[in-house]
Image: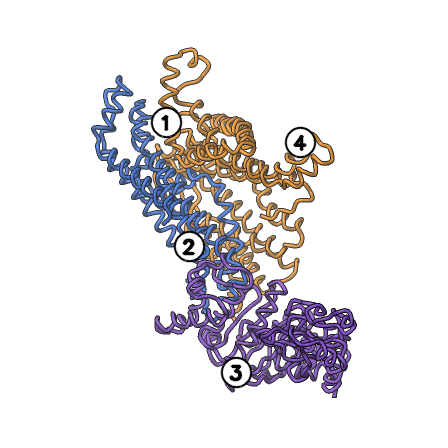
């Protein structure tokens, strides 16, 4: 019977198993200061027996729900339980951090340990499992997926987790963080914007002229293969020489290192996804449809505007999405060549061996990439004309 | 010998096959036919355990099919499906050789067998052996599929609409080839089709299924002349008398008929025309070249003037044609009798409409 | 092999040979850089020779890619089998979701867990490289037409035989495409590994940025770019061998 149970909902069981194991591993690490390694604390040391009992109870609920595989109500209960575990884990951790910090020396740092991350993964699995069962009701699915995250966000803003090391780090660098965050957005935004304009033009040109198609794609493909750091490096040399020879360029901010090579490189990297998707998007518009448009008396521009553009738009936007997500990551590397952005925190942290600073850079970048991805996916969906089914 | 005993298949609430019991003799062609969703394909796939029955037993040569591993069972059963499913990354030769390879046949034996099978299905082995499936036409692919099914010389063959995916002309040829091969090999064949004409042409016995149940299991003649219930009656169609005619060859009802040659003197021609309106004209090799209509005789002074020439294949039927084809040709040309030639074009005799009526009446009994 | 194909491979071999030849001969390199940067006192990063750097870089990429293939392909296979199908949705979700993660972030996150040096770099490369390989393995296997699989089982192949003789050969090209993506991304990410002490072609670039020596930067950037392009062409050629 156990075999059948496991086979039937092995996903659920795996999530529960990970969650339970995580309770016995190091949950928080107490460090005397920013740099040195510290002492590991387990969950019951943090939340006490009552806290442990609550979480264990919730896991038990999750486990027993693997018996009830059908129906919306079990799925909802599962989702609720998982979200509760998620929020409570954060809450207990945040409260414990505050409590401990009050006791310890002011330089002490409390960072999240393996156990915490394992629970995080486990709750992701459980929420995913409950989402699966709610396939038929999109609204319930969204509630289950996002409630926990939304609650956490509010708690975060209200300072509930301020005593965790990452946020301690943040409070030390608050102004700089915001500055670099905005700069990061600036770098990504402007490069992809330019890249989109150039990319759409090149892509359209490639569909119109057979001769240019091959070279355009060849160059775009090659540039995509070149490692980011290498491309940055290759741009630095000529740009330095240029700004050296023409001091006037220096005045307006175009230098060998810094923003200039970064923006140029990011623009180049945005090209391939956009050129390719524009090309495919325009190509896939059935010539019969275009013929029909011309046949009823539309001019070439009208055909372009009213037929080709709406039909190709979703694909082009997909290309922009790829370019944007890619650029968020590449802009992080650009910090190495002095362009700033959230990558600055990562590399400073690496240089100082300060884990929390690394996290202060890495986590927001990941979150930004996810948010950008989600926004663009929604936009693609909105732009897709109603009659088109996404056959992907 | 294949036996299904009370075989049932449920999919949740849907009953696909309901307590099916049927015995198929060795060397027999059993065609399972029925409307969509009647359970015929499910039944077929239960025999080689691609689907497992919910209850009931299936026996092959007395052995329950559950006693061996499915893959071992399937290696002794040939399997040919409508979509053929040739492996695109393997050559024709490798495709055919796959089951012998799984059975660890010795290499030379496999090579010989592959060549043998290709010629059996009518394809030049030197030409086709190293071709890839994407280079084959529909008919060729289907034939390779059959060759693959026969490769390890299994006693049993399961076929699911094997001739379905090609044009009617190719299908006709494939069916003829099938009959020819089966006469040679005498396999036990279970064939699923939705085409009643195909069933009538190929089957020793037909199993009609409806809503998962076996409705009638009998020879085509029996089903056509004595449908078991209203469903079968409607299913075989109101033209079942005509359908029956496709099972019978005209060999037995060809009657000798007078013929004249180009050089026959006119008075002999008049003599021959006394009894019938048309007289067939042959050349010096006794090959059919045309006919003479009695009404034209007065105007002509020699056979050459009177004869209406015609293309042998168009005016005559061959002597292994079916009653159905012959009747169809006669009706199409508005004739009451039609000449019959052998494979070499020699005039053999004629078939009259009255003979066909007589033959039909016989089979009715 | 067709004539055009053969010439392509010969060309590739020539370029790869030339590449290693130039790398191995420091003096050529040094002279070239000196020509371009007459003002710099030192044009070649003194720590190690270029050949060693290329070697370190390739080592990182090859080790992590090998482990990625050894783990990723079986994982992709398992998830498409009945025994693993419960995990197919979540693995599909994770692999597409994971690709939004910037590789830099994955590398950075490996440090708190595994320290500095080669280990966290290889681990980060392995993890991040897993995503395209798993995704493409799944996609390739699922693209095998159902009727061909049915024919395979029907004529008597066991599940394992069908996997090895039919499914994987038919999915091979797509899987190879995934491996190619994975390797190219890894070559790029491995460069950043230089920051955490993993060596490789990123080292001279980082050194050049720190010491404001553009010659160092070029010393690292050019071979890295060429290496990446050659690797991509090589893998693309291998990809085309499959059906």
Q: Colour of chain B?
A: purple
Check chain identity for marks 3 and 4: say if they share one: no
What's the distance in space between the residues labelled 2 and 1, CA to CA? 35 Å
Provide the chain ID for the residue under circle 3: B
Residue beneath the point at 49% across and 39% down: A366
Residue A226 image position (x, y, % from top left): 39, 34
- Secondary structure under badge 3? strand
Task: Tell us which disc is closer to us: 2 or 4.
Answer: 4
- Residue B25's image quarter? bottom right
Question: Separation of disc 4 and disc 1 at Cα?
Answer: 39 Å
Query: Dot 2 corresponds to which residue?
Result: C73
> Is residue C169 in sight in this rendering?
yes
| Residue at numbered disc 1 | A234
Tell me whether the residue at label 4 lies in contact with that at label 1, contact meaning CB atoms closer than 8 angstroms: no
Residue B39 visible here = no
Of badges 1 and 3, the one in the foreground is 3
Q: Colour of chain C?
A: blue
Vertical relation: B237 (above or below) A363:
below
- Which chain is orange in the rendering? A
Looking at the image, which is closer to me, A20 or B12? B12
Pick whichever, B21 or B264, lies toward us. Answer: B264
Q: Nearer the viewer, residue C120 or A100?
A: C120
């Amino acid at each position: 019977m156990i075999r059948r149970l496991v086979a039937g909902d092995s996903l659920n069981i795996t999530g529960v198993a990970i969650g339970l194991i995580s309770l016995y591993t190091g949950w928080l690490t107490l460090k005397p200061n920013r740099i040195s390694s510290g002492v590991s604390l387990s969950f019951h040391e943090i939340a006490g027996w009552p806290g442990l009992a609550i979480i264990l109870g919730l896991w038990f609920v999750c486990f027993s729900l693997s018996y009830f595989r059908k129906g919306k109500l079990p799925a909802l209960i599962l989702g609720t339980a998982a979200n509760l575990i998620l929020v409570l884990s954060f809450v207990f951790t945040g409260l414990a951090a505050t409590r401990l910090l009050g006791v310890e020396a002011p330089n002490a740092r409390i960072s999240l340990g393996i156990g915490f991350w394992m629970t995080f993964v486990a709750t992701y699995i459980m929420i995913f499992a409950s989402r699966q069962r709610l396939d038929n009701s999109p609204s319930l699915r969204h509630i289950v997926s996002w409630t926990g995250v939304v609650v956490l966000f509010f708690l975060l803003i209200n300072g509930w987790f301020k005593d965790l090391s990452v946020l301690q780090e943040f409070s030390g660098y608050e102004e700089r963080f915001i500055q670099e965050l905005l700069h990061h957005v600036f770098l990504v935004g402007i490069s992809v914007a330019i890249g989109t304009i150039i990319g759409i033009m090149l892509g359209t040109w490639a569909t119109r002229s057979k001769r240019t198609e091959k070279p355009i794609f060849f160059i775009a493909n090659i540039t995509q293969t070149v490692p980011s750091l290498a491309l940055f490096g290759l741009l630095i040399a000529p740009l330095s020489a240029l700004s050296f020879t023409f001091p006037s360029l220096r005045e307006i901010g175009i230098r060998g290192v810094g923003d200039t090579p970064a923006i140029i490189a990011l623009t180049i990297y945005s090209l391939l996804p956009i050129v390719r998707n524009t090309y495919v998007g325009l190509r896939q518009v059935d010539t019969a449809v275009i013929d029909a448009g011309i046949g009823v008396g539309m001019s070439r521009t009208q055909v372009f505007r009213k037929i080709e553009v709406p039909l190709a738009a979703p694909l082009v936007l997909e290309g922009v999405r790829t370019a944007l997500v890619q650029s968020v990551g590449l802009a992080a590397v650009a910090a190495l060549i002095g362009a700033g952005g959230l990558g600055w925190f990562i590399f400073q942290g690496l240089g100082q061996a300060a884990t929390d600073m690394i996290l202060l850079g890495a986590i927001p970048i990941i979150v930004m990439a996810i948010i950008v991805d989600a926004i663009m996916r929604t936009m693609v969906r909105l732009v897709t004309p109603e009659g088109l089914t996404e056959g992907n | 010998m294949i036996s299904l005993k009370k075989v049932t298949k449920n999919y949740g609430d849907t009953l696909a096959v309901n307590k099916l019991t049927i015995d198929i003799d060795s060397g027999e062609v059993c065609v399972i036919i029925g409307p969509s969703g009647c359970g015929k394909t499910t039944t077929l796939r239960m025999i080689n355990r691609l689907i497992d029955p919910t209850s009931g037993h299936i026996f092959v040569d007395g052995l329950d099919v559950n006693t061996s591993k499915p893959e071992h069972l399937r290696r002794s059963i040939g399997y040919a499906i409508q979509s053929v499913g040739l492996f695109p990354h393997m050559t024709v030769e490798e495709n055919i050789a796959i089951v012998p390879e799984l059975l660890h046949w010795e290499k030379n034996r496999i090579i010989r067998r592959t060549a043998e099978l290709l010629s059996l299905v009518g394809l030049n082995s030197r030409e086709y052996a190293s071709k890839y499936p994407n280079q084959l036409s529909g008919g060729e692919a289907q034939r390779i599929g059959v060759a693959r099914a026969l490769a390890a010389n299994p006693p049993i063959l399961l076929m699911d609409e094997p001739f379905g995916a090609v044009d009617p002309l190719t299908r006709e040829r494939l069916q003829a080839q099938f009959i020819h091969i089966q006469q040679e090999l005498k396999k036990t064949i279970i064939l699923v089709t939705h085409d009643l004409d195909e069933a009538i042409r190929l089957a020793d016995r037909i199993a009609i299924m409806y809503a998962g149940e076996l409705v009638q299991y009998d020879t085509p003649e029996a089903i056509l002349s004595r449908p078991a219930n209203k469903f079968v009656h409607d299913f075989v169609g109101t033209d079942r008398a005509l359908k029956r005619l496709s099972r019978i060859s005209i060999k037995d009802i060809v009657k000798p008929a007078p013929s004249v040659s180009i050089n026959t003197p006119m008075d002999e021609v008049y003599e021959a025309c006394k009894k019938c309106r048309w007289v067939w004209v042959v050349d010096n090799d006794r090959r059919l070249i045309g006919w003479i209509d009695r009404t034209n005789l007065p105007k002509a002074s020699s056979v050459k003037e009177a004869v209406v020439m015609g293309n042998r294949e168009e005016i005559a039927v061959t002597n292994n044609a079916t009653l159905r084809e012959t009747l169809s040709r006669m009706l199409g040309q508005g004739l009451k009798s039609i000449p019959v030639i052998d494979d070499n074009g020699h005039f053999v005799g004629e078939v009259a409409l009255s003979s066909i009526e007589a033959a039909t009446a016989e089979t009715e009994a | 092999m067709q004539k055009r194909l053969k010439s392509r491979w010969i060309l590739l071999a020539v370029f790869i040979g030339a590449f290693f030849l130039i790398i191995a001969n420091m003096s050529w390199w040094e002279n070239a850089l000196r020509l371009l940067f007459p003002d710099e006192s030192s044009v070649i990063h003194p720590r190690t020779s270029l050949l060693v750097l290329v070697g370190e870089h390739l080592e990182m990429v090859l080790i992590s890619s090998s482990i990625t293939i050894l783990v990723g392909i079986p994982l992709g296979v398992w998830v498409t089998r009945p025994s693993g199908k419960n995990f197919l949705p979540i693995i599909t979700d994770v692999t597409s979701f994971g690709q939004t993660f910037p590789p830099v972030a994955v590398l950075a996150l490996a440090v708190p867990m595994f320290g500095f040096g080669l280990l966290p770099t290889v681990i980060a490369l392995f993890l991040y490289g897993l995503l395209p390989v798993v995704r493409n393995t799944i996609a390739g296997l699922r693209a095998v037409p159902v009727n061909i699989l049915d024919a395979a089982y029907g004529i008597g192949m066991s599940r394992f035989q069908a996997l090895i003789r039919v499914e994987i050969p038919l999915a091979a090209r797509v899987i190879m495409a995934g491996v190619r993506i994975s390797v190219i991304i890894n070559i790029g990410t491995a460069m950043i590994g230089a920051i955490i002490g993993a060596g490789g072609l990123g080292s001279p670039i980082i050194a050049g940025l720190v010491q404001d020596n553009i010659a160092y930067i070029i010393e690292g950037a050019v071979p890295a770019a060429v290496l990446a392009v050659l690797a991509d062409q090589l893998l693309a050629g291998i990809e085309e061998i499959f059906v």
